[in-house]
Amino acid sequence: MDTAHPSFPILVALFVLLLGVTSSQPYEEFLQCLEFHDSNITSIVYTRANSSFSSLLESSIRNPRFDTSATPKPLLIFTPRQISHIESAIRCSRAHRIQIRVRSGGHDYEGLSYSTISPSLTFLVLDLRNLRAIQVDVPSKTAWAQAGATLGELYYAIAAESRTLAFPAGICPTVGLGGQISGGGWGTLLRKYGLAADNVLDATVIDAKGRILNRASMGEDLFWAIRGGGGNTFGIVIAWKIKLVPVPATVTACTVTRTLEQNATEIVHRWQYVVDKLPNDVFFMVVLNSVANPVQANATTIQASFNSLYLGGIEGLIPMMDAKFPDLGLRRENCVEMSWAKSILYFAGFPLNSPLESLLDRTISATGSAKFKGKSDYVKEPIPISGFEGIWEKLKEVGVQTGGLILASYGGKMSEIPESSIPFPHRAGNIYQVEEVAFWVEDGVEAADGYLNWLRGLYEYMTPYVSKNPREAYANYRDLDIGRNGGGGEGDYRRARSWGSSYYKNNFDRLVRVKTAVDPANFFRNEQSIPPLSSWR
Ligand code: FDA
């Protein structure tokens, strides 16, 4: 090598040193730092001056509530193509005090993978869209999937190899593997096989020091924490090695809708006594919302939509449901047989004849242009009829299809997995999980406040009927109402304990210990990341 002429990166570094790093533009310093590590790297950096910046930022914003002119924007978007790019980004972010927000699928309920509540925070979005390779190995029933892949891409890759293998993760195809598995990940297979995070065998992670780790080198504590302890906290997950699970070649998906005039109150009430005790091959979800009354003009009613998936053919399902849940009155015409991969499209609301390739569409949005907020609860004792009647009153307060509850059946495998197996603790004793949600299309703070207040009122109303001490919540339905760190993610153990116990129950302290060991300086952080406890350093 010719050492007489310093290379371009070294010249840049010397230049930066001579300047004493006094540039007023933090991203320029950051870019110089990146160039020092890899002279080609700037082609994957999009600054605000770049014409693609806004479209790139918006392309994975899944909650338009955080896509307004008032939403704090990143300094730049970084789209790594290889692991070394992420190593460089971590080194340069540390050196120039730019916070990293990792984005996989962009579904964070509070927009924390691409925004912040703190207008003065200097941060970049590290968007993993280019790291989404998937390798399925049918003989070992395993797959390696990069964290930037979506659930739909994973399901499609599995279906391309086998009709009888699946992965027990979420329903919405555009959700990213990075955030989903970092927070748990439930879907139609949870009563049979548990959560996505229960079925992780290994992972590739980059920690705050820029070290690339696998399960053996990271150790069991960190491997435990990344499977449900929340994203953007312990490091950046590059890829997951997952266990694929067997499913029959034919499964049956059914939908039955009932309004109040069709006995919905009694059927939903009865559903609670049945649903966690059904065979593990059955998953049941009920969506409750206000709809136009089909038999009375200009009036509304409440509709309960019972969506189920049975791991088997229709012939086995109907007699079993007739015996165990006759109140529903399930009929053959309510059901369709299909492959498991197609059932994802069914549950995600695609038309029945949609091609499997729809799973690959990263641009579709489950909520369209609607802004939303979600909250979550766990039900351990059946809610009485009078409790549901009060819920109907709440649902009638908002417009048709703008607010609702989604009840997802637990029991089965979920009750067999110990609470401390992974950070996700909501196991035995739960009949079902509740998501309370509000959707709206109107712009502006006033409209948003109206829907947010309504949702908070519904949540308040639910208090006597749901888990207590702590009131449990699902970490992947992030809700900053239940508590948060400082705007820049500065954590305080005592403050974090309140929301941390809701998400993680007794696993919270172990998460704090792992965080303290692997990232004592709290490099990876956001408004709801686990804080380190410096005294345990
Ligand atoms: P996003 O990219 O926003 O990341 C979420 C969090 O994880 C952020 O803090 C982010 O920084 C961090 N993160 C992302 N990638 C990371 C990585 N590689 N390493 C470390 N941290 C990383 N849930 C469910 O269990 N079942 C379901 O069926 C659904 N369905 C659903 C539908 C819709 C329309 C929405 C909006 C959400 C869901 N969810 C869900 C919730 C979903 O699981 C949750 O929002 C996930 O965190 C989203 O993961 P993404 O990668 O898409 O989000």
Image (spheres, helix red, strand yellow):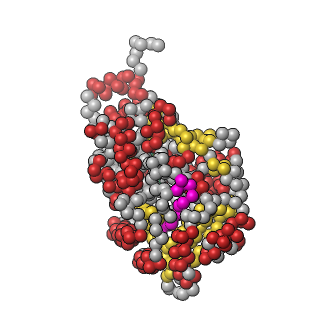
Vertical arrangement, residue 500 with respect to residue 407, above or below: above
Residue name at image x 52 percent, y 70 percent: 272
Vertical arrangement, residue 531 with respect to residue 301, above or below: above
Res. 179 visible in picture:
no
Across and down, in percent, residue 494 comes to 28, 50
Across and down, in percent, residue 509 comes to 35, 46
- Picture quadrant where residue 270 is located: bottom right
Q: 427 or 102: which is nearer to us?
A: 427
Vertical arrangement, residue 57 with respect to residue 392, above or below: above
Residue name at image x 65 percent, y 70 percent: 321
Tell me which segment is drawn in magenta.
405-416
Residue name at image x 56 percent, y 81 percent: 263
Q: 21 or 366: which is nearer to us?
A: 366
Across and down, in percent, residue 413 comes to 56, 55
> Is 411 included in the stretch rendered in magenta?
yes
For this orientation, the residue located farthest to the right is 315
Across and down, in percent, residue 318 comes to 69, 69
Question: Quick one: quadrant of the C terminus?
Answer: top left
Residue name at image x 32 percent, y 23 percent: 14
> Is 309 included in the stretch rendered in magenta?
no
